[in-house]
Amino acid sequence: MEVQRMKLNDMLQGLIQYLTEGFARIFSPAKDDYKDIGIQPFDCKPYIKIEAIEANETALNS
């Protein structure tokens, strides 16, 4: 009986540790460590060929 209690206690303790580590990982601050130079995250309008052609035609007609 004592062995079963110890196994149950170990299982519950492992489950609680597993859940709290997951919770801490989800709600901890992001660890994004981008450098000041080099590749940066994309944050501008994507290139669309039609707009470039229209801009070029407008420039030529001016």
Image (spheres, helix red, strand yellow):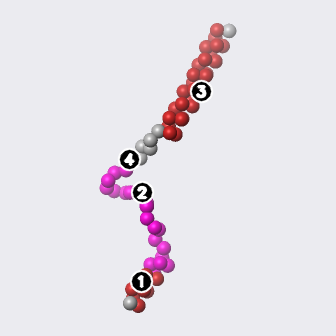
Q: Secondary structure at mark 2?
A: loop
Q: Residue at x 46, y 81 (%)?
A: 53
Secondary structure of residue under mark 4: loop
Residue named by callout 2: 41
- The quadrant the N terminus occupies is top right
Residue that protrudes farthest toward the bottom in the picture: 61
What label sits on residue 6 in the rendered view? none
**Mark 2 vs 1, N-terminal side:** 2
Residue 38 placement: quadrant: bottom left
Q: Quadrant of residue 62?
A: bottom left
**Mark 4 → mark 3, Cα distance in angstroms:** 31 Å
For residue 56, the mark is 1
Residue that carries the numbered disc 3 in the rendered image:
15
Coordinates of residue 6 in the picture (x, y in percent)? 61, 14
Which span is picked out in magenta? 33-53
Amino acid at the residue labelled 2: Pro
Q: Amino acid at mark 1?
A: Asn
